[in-house]
Image (cartoon, grey):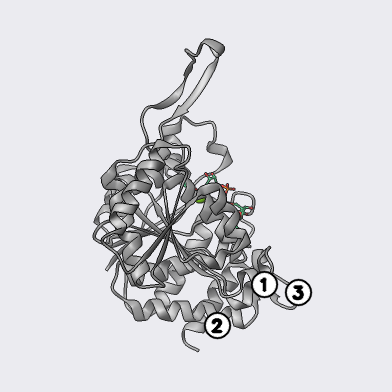
Amino acid sequence: MKIAVLPGDGIGPEIISEAVKVLNALGPKFELETAPVGGAAYDVAGHPLPPATLELAKNADAILFGAVGDWKYDTLARELRPEQAILGLRKHLELFANFRPAICYDELTAASSLKAEIVGGLDILIIRELNGDIYFGQPRGIRASELPLFKGAREGFDMMHYCEPEVERIGRVAFEAARKRSKKVCSVDKANVLETSQLWREVMIRVGKDYPDVELSHMYVDNAAMQLVKAPKAFDVVVTGNLFGDILSDEAAMLTGSIGMLPSASLDKNNKGLYEPSHGSAPDIAGKGIANPLATVLSAAMMLRYSLGLPEQADRIEAAVQKVLTQGLRTADIFTAGTTKVSTIQMGDAVVAALSQ
Ligand SMILES: NC(=O)C1=CN([C@@H]2O[C@H](COP(=O)(O)OP(=O)(O)OC[C@H]3O[C@@H](n4cnc5c(N)ncnc54)[C@H](O)[C@@H]3O)[C@@H](O)[C@H]2O)C=CC1
Ligand SMILES: CC(C)CC(=O)C(=O)O
Ligand SMILES: [Mg+2]
């Protein structure tokens, strides 16, 4: 089984090293091939997603991705920015279905910024559409305005856009996922204002008729943002577009204690996938050895389950993560009084040790 390993920038290489360490300790032999991506690729090849990296990703059975981006690339032309690498991979490989499970481990309720009774036992699944919306819509750009009131002033514009089949396919993914959980889907949109969302809602209702056993509800995104911190356990599967899903999943991350705990899977229609933590490259803590590698380790577990057909190995990793948390080991982002602070590498080592305990 061939895994493309793309560490990227910032904390990317630090957290990927720990996930690779865990994969190598499992038993099954994986063929791991590493390639530069993001700013690291721009530095060596002049492009954030060089053809060789894209080829490797296309030909692998799965992709393990760290994170891309750094402030030092912020002045580059948009097409050369590191973020284009992850957007490009998602688009080229048609990874349209992004699974972001937000689970609050009992041991981490104190690490959440919310009260324990609000987040204790939380287990929700955000399903974010990943190939459309305002992130990919055309036209977009910055130009001189033609608006009478602002004529000649610079204006920025991005097209929010969804085609009916795009909404339908992510809707089906969400309903199927809900069937394996508590049979509830909440579709989040802004249908009171946006045409795109009106279409989104109409399609969700139509697709929902094929899943009479699943309860479909709808919520405007502003209310969803509020309900996520008010009563997050009222949700089960949340399905939403690219932009709203990006924002809501970072919000949900804090319910679990830290964004360093939130893994993700980005899947195509055949369950080929890219696996990455939900967070970014965290340049503010890069190189300090304090990043939490667990979101990446848990993403590797999702990879074994969804793309590589090794659910028992995925279970082993998840059980090992549970064990290190029970042992009281915490990176700085989830540290609370009475627990033991460990580095990125120590956390990875502890997960490896827990695999055989
Ligand atoms: N998929 C990707 O590669 C993504 C890349 N980015 C890029 O990452 C860069 C930084 O973006 P930000 O908005 O700061 O988001 P970020 O997610 O990188 O960081 C936000 C905050 O969370 C903390 N954090 C993130 N991951 C952590 C971890 N594993 N352990 C402990 N703390 C962690 C950071 O230190 C920071 O304070 C930007 O260039 C952005 O474009 C952002 C999101 C996704
Ligand atoms: C860096 C962006 C392209 C995406 C992002 O923030 C995310 O996927 O969570
Ligand atoms: Mg994001």
**Residue 289 spot, x, y in % from top left:** 62, 62
Q: Is residue 146 above or below residue 284?
A: above
**Residue 5 spot, x, y in % from top left:** 38, 59
Question: Mark number for residue 323?
Answer: 2
Is the N terminus in the top left, top right, bottom left or bottom right quadrant?
Answer: bottom left
Q: Which residue is mark 3?
A: 337
**Mark 2 belongs to which amino acid?**
Lys
Which residue is located at x 28 percent, y 44 percent?
164
**Mark 1 belongs to which amino acid?**
Ala
Distance between the alpha carbons at the discs numbered 2 and 1: 20 Å
- Is residue 216 visible to the viewer in this orientation of the structure? yes
**Residue 332 spot, x, y in % from top left:** 67, 65
Q: Nearer the viewer, residue 91 or 147?
A: 147
* Ligand 1 within 8 Å, label 2 CB: no
| Callouts 2 and 3 close, C-beta under 8 Å | no
User: For the residue carrying disc 1, how many other residues have a C-alpha within 10 Å: few (<14), some (14-19), or many (20+)?
Assistant: some
**Location of residue 75 by image quarter:** top right
Q: Nearer the viewer, residue 185 or 349?
A: 185
Distance between the alpha carbons at the discs numbered 3 and 1: 15 Å
Q: Nearer the viewer, mark 2 or mark 1?
A: 1
Q: Which residue is mark 1?
A: 116
